[in-house]
Amino acid sequence: MIIDDSRSPLVFLRRHLDPERRHDHDDEQRLEQLLERGHPFVLITDHAADDHADESADQRRQHAAFFKRIKDRMRLLCRGMVVLEGDRPLPAPIRALAGTSSKAFGFPVAFARDEDEAIALGRRLLSPRG
């Protein structure tokens, strides 16, 4: 995953094309740094929840422990996540998983057809009225 915060408070999580770098511990450090800034943000991602199907059980445990450690700060600072669907809407089971994740993380998950729509949704999530 590539974390692009050049348009902060809109933070883009992009799929890394190199399969060896898809689950990089540097990602966790970059996410920690984002949280340490203490400013609200919205995540915009081009990957779905099932992108992690190739992870080992140990990798899943490590990620779960990491997200458990940052959960409270994520709830405080992350105003939401927007998932880019592209040309084809995500299947219902993936959307259901996003709803479950939304409850677990404590922020809304929305879906957008393209980056322009995602940016508009992100700005709406950041507005005081949300």
Image: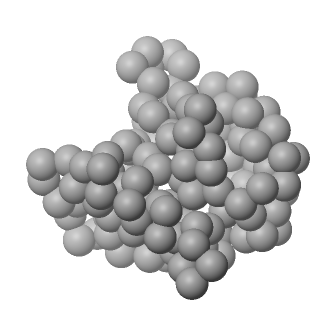
Examine the rendered structure and indicate whether residue 30 appears above or below residue 116. above
Residue 105, percent from left and from top = 64, 69
Q: Does residue 24 appear in this view?
A: yes
The residue at the point 12 percent across, 48 percent down is: 87
Way the structure is coloured: one colour
Residue 119, percent from left and from top = 40, 54
Q: Does residue 102 appear in this view?
A: no
Q: Residue 32 appears in which quarter of the rendering?
A: top right
Describe residue 22's horizontal placement relative to residue 88 as left or right: right
Describe residue 122's horizontal placement relative to residue 117 as left or right: right
Describe residue 2's horizontal placement relative to residue 114 as left or right: right
Examine the rendered structure and indicate whether residue 101 appears above or below residue 57. below
What quarter of the picture does the C terminus occupy? Answer: bottom right
**Camera-nearest residue between 119 and 92:** 119
Describe residue 85's horizontal placement relative to residue 77 as left or right: left
Examine the rendered structure and indicate whether residue 46 appears above or below residue 103. above
Q: Which residue lies most toward the left here?
A: 87
The residue at the point 66 percent across, 63 percent down is: 78
Residue 113, percent from left and from top = 22, 55
